[in-house]
Image (cartoon, grey):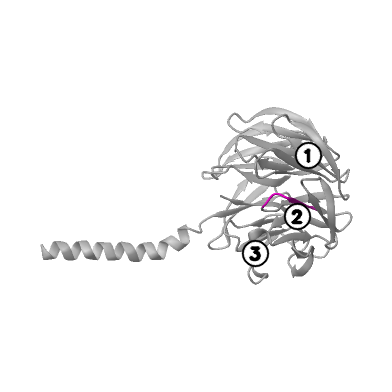
């Protein structure tokens, strides 16, 4: 009986030790996907090691932005060169489907319900709406000139579309699929961010080197923040106190205080930084450097680059897999 008790106790202790060692790794074993537009591939980075663990085809030409289903099982890759979105099994890396969209399919975004995928098409000045269950196109909505990205309100009732060519934001009712308002913004409108309370919408304006702040109640600009040369990608920082934007002509990331509405610091990265992604715990930023063929990883607590990861040719899009 004592021997059995000793064996059981030893097994429990061993299990606890193994769990203590493994659980921190598995709890952080997410992935970052990077689209490489120069060689039509996807680099998959393991966040735990910050190394490329796999390189797979994009199943399209000139891949740009990436979105995931909420459970992380599917990846959606917008391919500018083939006017389509590739649907990929995110676990097995197999090709599920190709969805024909508008011209130069650029910005795919999953709706809050997960039932729809909205794709901004800058070549045809419209947004394609796809049913995710069937991968069938439900509707196409005309917006401004050269739409780049789509961002949903937190309740899913509105969609905001950045129109770079017309310097505007299209506001769309997601139930009726009707444009309800067009908000004037700066030329080169691209990156979008929404405050945690949904009251403030932030938009990068690359041709004017500014970030505009829009009151979503009145749909009017309340501030315009000088950001830096060719401001492009954007991500909301942890707790919404800051936003991070890429400055493509300065090879930097600018950190903007949402309270002060000004740049408080900059971080040097690689050449021509483009899109930015934030890990789910808010600790790390992943920045694609298009002309350096690399990804810079930034610690958001110290705002320093902790490593640089080589990827494919001309990386463009980046997204964290849930």
Q: Secondary structure at mark 3?
A: strand
What residue sits right under mark 1 in the picture? 171
Q: Nearer the viewer, mark 3 or mark 2?
A: 2
Q: Nearer the viewer, mark 1 or mark 2?
A: 1
Q: Which mark is residue 196?
A: none
Q: Quadrant of residue 210?
A: bottom right
Query: Which callout, 1 or 2, points at the residue further toward the start of the chain?
Result: 1
Q: Secondary structure at mark 1?
A: strand
Left or right relative to 262: residue 7: left
The CA span between labels 1 and 2 is 20 Å
Label 3 crowd (10 A; few <14 / some 14-19 / many >=20) = many
| Residue 201 forms part of the magenta stretch | yes
Q: Which mark is residue 297?
A: 3
Query: Which callout, 3 or 1, points at the residue further toward the start of the chain?
Result: 1
Q: Quadrant of residue 79?
A: top right
- 312, 83: nearer the viewer: 83
The percent coordinates of residue 137 (x first, y second) are 68, 28
Q: Which mark is residue 233?
A: 2
Q: Is residue 180 above or below residue 268?
A: above
Q: Is residue 87 above or below residue 221?
A: above
What's the magenta region?
197-203
- 99, 177: nearer the viewer: 177
Cβ atoms at labels 3 and 1 below 8 Å apart: no
Left or right relative to 15: residue 229: right
The CA span between labels 3 and 1 is 33 Å
């Amino acid at each position: 009986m004592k021997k059995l008790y000793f064996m059981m106790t030893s097994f429990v202790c061993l299990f606890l030790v193994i769990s203590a060692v493994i659980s921190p790794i598995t709890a952080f074993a997410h992935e970052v996907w990077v689209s490489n537009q120069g060689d039509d591939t996807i680099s998959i980075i393991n966040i735990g090691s910050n190394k490329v663990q796999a390189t797979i085809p994009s199943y399209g030409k000139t891949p740009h932005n990436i979105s995931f289903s909420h459970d992380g099982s599917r990846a959606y890759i917008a391919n500018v060169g083939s006017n389509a979105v590739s649907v990929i099994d995110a676990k097995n890396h197999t090709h599920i489907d190709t969805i024909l969209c508008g011209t130069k399919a650029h910005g795919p975004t999953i709706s809050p319900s997960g039932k729809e995928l909205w794709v901004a098409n800058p070549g045809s000045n419209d947004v394609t709406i796809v049913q995710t269950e069937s991968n069938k196109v439900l509707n196409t909505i005309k917006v401004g000139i050269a739409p780049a990205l789509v961002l949903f309100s937190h309740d899913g009732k509105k969609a905001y579309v950045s129109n770079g060519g017309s310097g505007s934001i299209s506001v769309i009712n997601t139930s009726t699929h009707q444009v309800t308002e067009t908000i004037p913004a700066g030329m080169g409108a691209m990156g979008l961010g929404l405050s945690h309370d949904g009251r403030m919408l932030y938009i990068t304006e690359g041709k004017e080197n500014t970030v505009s702040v829009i009151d979503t109640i009145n749909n009017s600009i309340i501030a315009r923040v000088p950001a830096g040369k060719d401001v492009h990608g954007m991500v909301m920082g942890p707790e919404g106190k800051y936003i991070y934007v890429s400055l493509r002509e300065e090879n930097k990331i600018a950190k903007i205080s949402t309270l002060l509405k000004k740049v408080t610091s900059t971080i040097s990265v690689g050449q021509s930084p483009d899109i930015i992604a934030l890990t789910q715990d808010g600790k790390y930023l992943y920045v694609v450097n298009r002309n350096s063929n690399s990804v810079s990883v930034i610690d958001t607590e110290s705002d320093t680059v902790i490593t640089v990861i080589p990827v494919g040719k001309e990386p463009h899009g980046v997204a964290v897999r849930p």
